[in-house]
Structures are given as C-alpha cells and as structure tokens.
Image (tube, helix red, strand yellow):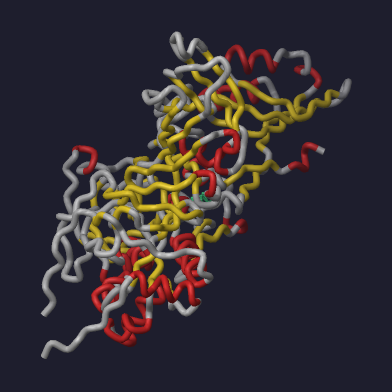
Amino acid sequence: MYSKMLSLRFPKKIVDEPIAVNLVKKFDLSFNIHKAVIYPRKEGLMVLELSGHRKNFQKGVHYLKSIGVKVESIGQDIRRNEKKCLQCGACTAVCPTGALHIKRPEMEVVFDNERCSACEWCVSACPARAMEVSFNKVLLE
Amino acid sequence: MAKKTFSRTIDEINRKIKQGTVVVVTANEMTDIVKKKGAEKAAREIDVVTTGTFSPMCSSGAFINFGHTKPGIKASQVWLNDVPAYAGIAAVDIYIGATEPSEDDPLNRVHPGQFKYGGGHVIQDLVAGKKVELKATGYGTDCYPNREVRKKVTIEDLPYAVLLNPRNSYQNYNCAINLTSKTIYTYMGVLKPNGGNANYATSGQLSPLFNDPYYLTIGLGTRIFLGGAKGHVIGPGTQHNPHAPRGKNGVPLSGAGTLMVMGNLKEMDPRWVVGVSILGYGCSLAMGLGVPIPILNADMARYTGVSDEEIYTRIIDYGNDYPQGEAKSLGQVSYGELKSGLIRFNGQEIPTVPISSYIRALEIATTLKEWIEKGEFLLTHPQEMLPTVPPPERA
Ligand code: SF4
Ligand code: SF4
C-alpha cells in the first residue's frame, strides 16, 4: 500500500474529464479529497490523498500528467510520537540520513527533525509505530 | 586458611527493607562498585542489586475469564478486537497470545507485512483501560445454550485477567547480520544486505540473568517487576537451557536461561506492556521486566558486578544460516563493542542497532530500586530453583 498527498492543477479544458472515475476504475486507486476548487474559466485545484499499489500509483500519476494535469506532491513532515516511542533503536537500522541516531553513552534514541528527508522508511520499521507522517497543511487552507 | 567469608540471608535483607536501612544499587552501579572495591567488600556494603530489560518478548500472553453471560455460553471460539484467542479451556476462560494477528491481517502476502494489530496490542489496550470488542461463539449445550455473545469490555469488567508469559527475559541473545544481497525482515529487525547492520537485543550488564548466571537466587516464587507491577517468576521458561557454553565468568555465550513469569494484568501499566508490529515478521509484545538480586555472598557480588565488556554473544547470519536451522557462530562480540555503535567483522566495520531499550531497562532497574528502598517491595524465597549447572569451584 502506497499513499501520498498530491496537489493537482488542471486547465479549463480538462475540468470535465472524469478524472476521479478513471483513477478508481483504470488504476485501482482510492483517494480522499481534501480540497477541490474549480473556477470557471480558470484553472482548477484539487488536493487529494491518493492510495494504492505503488505501480498503480505511478501509472495513475502518469495518466494525470498525460492529460495535462500538473501534479505535485505536498511536503510531508515526519514526527515522532514521544509517548509511543519505546527508545529501542530499531529505527536506526533503516534511517538513511542519521536523523534517527543513538546518543552515547546514554543510549538515548534521538530524532533530529532537521536531518530528516521524509523518506518514511522508519514509519513501518518502528515496532511501536511511533513515527508519524503529517502533511504540510499550507496548501489545504 | 579458611577465612570466614561473608554471607547474608533474604530474611536479613527484608528486615533491613522494613527498617529502611537496606542498601540497593542498580546493576550498572554495582559494576563500578565491584571494580573499585572488589567483590568481598561490595558484598558487605550492598544488600540488593536491581536489574531490568525492556524488549519485544514474543512468548507472552494473558489468561482471561470474561464472566458468565445471560443466558450462558460455552465459548468455543473467541475474538478480542478481531484477534482470535485460544478458547479450548473452560466455558468462559481464554488465553490471548501476543503474536496472534488480527483475523483479517494480510500477513506477509505483500512482503514485508505490517502486522498492525495483534494479541500484544489487545493486551496493551486492556491494560490501558480501553474498550475491547469481545465476540464469542459456541455450539450450545443444555447448561450453556447461548451460541453467540458480543460485548464491549474493559479490563474492569473482566473478573480475571492475568499475564502469563511462557518465556521472557532470555539470558543472552544472538547478534544478527545478513550476508545475502537482499534486505531481510526478521524478528531481530530490518537487516540490510552484505552485513549492512548488526542488530542485538538484551540490556547487557543490566539484564536480569546476566547478573545471576547460574540462577542461584532466582526460582519459582521470586518476586519481580513485571509490566510496571509486582509479578513472579513461576519457573523456567520454554527453551530454558542451562547447558549452553559459558565463558570463564559463568556468563553463557548464547541463549541459555529463560523465565516463565506471571502477574496481575489489572495492576500493570501500559508503558511497560506494549503491543508491537515487527515489519515482515509479526505482532508481539514489548515487556518491561526487572529482577532484584539479593547479594547473599561475595559470589553474588562478583556475578552482579559483571560489565558489558565481559559479556559476549555470537554473530549469526540471519540471511543464510539461521533460516536453514543451521545457525553457526561467525564470531564473538562483547556488549561493550555492540553498545559502542560499531563492530569489526571480517575486516569490515558494521554499525550496530539495538532492538531492546537500554534507557528504559535502566528506568526499570531504578524504579525497582526505589520500590525496595521505600519498603514497598520485599524479596521472596524461591520455593523451587531453576534447572542449572554447578558453577565451577573457585580457587
Ligand atoms: S524504532 Fe520506534 S520505538 Fe524504537 S526508538 Fe525508533 S522511533 Fe522509538
Ligand atoms: S523519514 Fe527517513 S530520514 Fe526521516 S527519520 Fe524516518 S528514516 Fe530517517
């Protein structure tokens, strides 16, 4: 299962395309619309979370681009739920940037947000599911 | 020549606990004390050493009696939040195992599976006081005609809920690496290809059974810290094997001893009983457990004085050897090296990754120390010792 928050901007001429239907039927994707504004004679904007198999996700995004939709992924923020974190260290096996690392000699598992690339590898590798993804909400306002 | 060596009894220690004069230190502090003062002097000064470990412990679960319903049911299948429990015991008695996944979990069909919710999570939710959906089905009998029960229960509603973990607190554990060319997902965590990382468990010198390697003070009836409450050791855990090879200090170089433990789930704290999802492997339960070691003589002082540098484990390839059931040691490393963050293996430097929390293990040892100092926790006499091997005679 793969899931990303996307912003779609599309020109007037394709506003009438059944984009949503195609994403579901042709690519077996599901989505959750967070915002949709379509201005007559102006470009439309839609913010949605698109989910499905990674391959289908890529095909779906390819389809959107092919019909002229401008697709951008929305910046995501990774945070650690300190209440859930067990301080075990298992996440340090997968973190490629060292954002999650161990402070010695205390053996404290530190999360340094500044070094995080939001790759999300830690999210499912953390046994306590303490690493959480939150979306950059700016575009949703 | 036979100089009278020092000894004390558990009763003497308990008297001091009640008087408020007991001297308790953590296994970390004891390591320094024994190094500085020697075992004989340390034994005279210190009454109790506290230990701790906090780690996923798969062989865990809870016995629950959910109370008779109206009309009554002889439950033959039971689910808690869609996680199947074992119902092949009396009418409304069940056992919920930590590693049981939700009934509709996709498991490893898309590898590596997420294992989002399982028995360990049910147990944590109960301990946290959350509502859990109970579903029971039965075939109906003259005395218990009901065929299906559904209700939401909290731990308060359950007449009986006891944690009974068949195997916890493994004395020692492998250091896992992966020598294949693909990432693998194991109960030891994620292992990157070509020896990309080396994962290890246990809290080393803080770990309970490293501090009493021959189980001279631990047995059936030993009162312990279990899941944030008081619990007991009730015997050797499954796979308990005192015959594992040992170093000169008596510390096993692999698995060896284990504990079966039991405690009242209703008294526990969700901070120390945590459901976990091990990527590609399954559900489990992270347990916090601590054992107080009475310093009955200089031998016990010496054992509890052991340091990370003197405790060794084996490096095992979880890519090729372990899955074939042919785990062989590719080398020995000390917990001192493992904790440093890097080990040397075949001329290569490998970053190490702990999967047990050292910081939280220390918190357990410290908490247990405070309980004893405050007079809230008395030591017990084990009624039956764990199977062991005789310690070598000291010259
Ligand atoms: S793996 Fe999860 S629980 Fe463990 S230290 Fe990392 S964030 Fe915390
Ligand atoms: S998202 Fe990636 S970079 Fe950020 S902490 Fe997790 S593993 Fe490290």
B257 or B3, which lies in front?
Answer: B3
Residue sitting at the far bottom: B1
Please report the residue visible at 50 percent of the width from the left and 40 percent of the height from the top.
A124
Quarter that holds the C terminus of chain B: bottom left
Q: What is the count of numbered marks?
A: 0
What percent of the width, then of the height, locates residue B34?
Answer: 32, 81
Is any part of residue A68 visible from this angle? Answer: yes
Classify B292 as above or below A83: below
Horizontal side of residue A5 vs B165, given as left or right: right
- What residue lies at 56% left-to-right and 21% top-to-bottom? B69
Drawn side of residue A78 relative to residue B296, left or right = right
Which residue is more in the foreground, A35 or B247? B247
Q: Name which quarter of the figure residue B48 lies in.
A: bottom left
- Reply above or below: B282 against B88: below
- Residue B279, x across and y down, in percent: 43, 39
- Judge from the rendering whether residue B122 lies leftward or rightward of residue B37; answer left or right: right
Image quadrant of residue B252? bottom left
Image-based side of B16 in relation to B183, left or right: right
Q: Is residue A44 above or below residue B71?
A: below
Given the current orientation, which residue lies at the most extreme right position?
A40
Camera-side residue of B133 and A107:
B133
Residue drawn at x 49%, y 17% as measured from the top left:
B73
Residue in the foreground of this view, choosing between B331 and B219: B219
Location of residue B54 in the rendering, given as x and y in whole percent from the top left corner: 43, 55
Residue B245 percent coordinates (x, y):
15, 59
Q: Quadrant of the N terminus of chain B?
A: bottom left
Identify the residue at horizontal 59%, vertical 34% (top origin): B157
Residue B341 seen in render: no
